[in-house]
Amino acid sequence: MKSAIKLFLQLTYIGFALARQHITSYVTSLLGSVFWFILLMIPSAMYSGNPEALVVLYLPSYLAMAICMVSISSSVEFLRWYVYDGLTDMYREAGLGVYHYVLSGFVVDASFAFTSFAILASIAGQYAGLSPMWFLRLNPVFIPLVILASLSTEVFFGGLTSVIYTNTRLGGGFHGFLQMAVAISTYTPLWLLPNPFIGFVNPAILLAEVMRAGYGYSTIPGDLLLIISPGLIALYFLVGFALFKAADKTIAKYGLEFRV
């Protein structure tokens, strides 16, 4: 446990040092998340009779989407653009892989995502007649789950992106389609599914639903989420780690090439 914490702190230090080099990834990813939020929020707002419920239901999906966007972009960045710059080789020579790179940026990624969430929440809150700081009323019981769900979401989609990139011949544009698929599924209300638990195939939905529960607007009861969330988060971590390992195995065997 001590060594894991030490490694996380070391990776976080590296993440802050590298953050300025991939500031464009943060900006484009967050702009993409804002675009999806506006695209889906405006039509819904036109027909909603309860603006407060609409804002509280959609904004957690925005946060989950922002985490996904940054994770996918960071993985592609490490496996695509940094191959040309030689940074990928430097990481691997130090015994670090794409998993370590994605994990190193989590604190910075989450800071950007939560900051943009707070700004959007303040703006959207004006439409719903809420106070500018309404988003701070999140039930503190759910805060640890929100943090862990954010991390597991980043690990899962980072690993998924890595496997797709290293084990297929898809070009650099595939991550845009992946982000689109994740956005649509993340914003789909759970009550529209035949069984709401099907939605948890997407880790971002658990993050959004846990956050909604903290505001008292979840489809699945908050008490039940407190019970099932730790197991689902652990599962997402395990799947994400397995995907990263598969990607690293492919890289070790075949290497990486810079793709336009």
Image (cartoon, grey):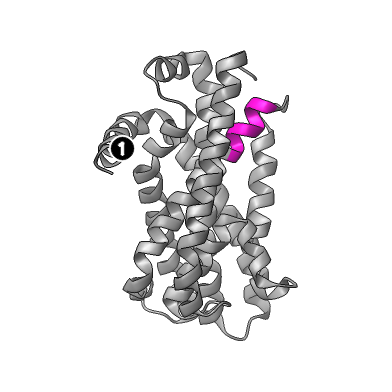
- The answer to whether any part of residue 47 appears in the image is yes
Residue at the outermost bottom position: 49
Residue 85 x, y percent position in the rendering: 47, 15
Q: For this view, does 94 lie left or right of residue 52?
A: left
Q: Quadrant of the C terminus?
A: top right
Q: Is residue 30 visible?
A: no
Seen from the viewer's position, the closer of residues 34 and 190 is 190
State the residue at coordinates (72%, 73%): 192
Which secondary structure lies at badge 1? Answer: helix
Magenta-drawn stretch, dominant element (helix, strand or loop): helix
Residue drawn 40% across the image and 45% down it: 109
- Residue underneath mark 1: 12
Tell me where residue 215 sits by quadrant. bottom left
Q: Is residue 73 above or below residue 89?
A: below
Specify the quadrant that holds the N terminus. top left
Look at the image and give the residue range highlighted in magenta.
Answer: 160-167
The residue carrying pointer 1 sits among few (fewer than 14), some (14 to 19) or many (20 or more) residues within 10 Å by Cα, namely many
Q: Position of 41 compared to 28: left or right?
A: right
User: Where residue 101 appears, x then y in whole percent?
Assistant: 42, 31
Where does the image place residue 155, in percent across and percent down from the top left? 49, 44
Q: Is residue 232 above or below residue 72?
A: below
Three-letter code for the amino acid on which mark 1 is drawn: Thr
* Location of residue 109 with respect to 224 vertically, above or below: above
Residue closest to the far right: 194
Task: Please name the residue shown 35% across and 75% down the image.
Answer: 139
Nearest the viewer among 209 and 63 is: 209
Q: Residue at x 30, y 30 (%)?
A: 17
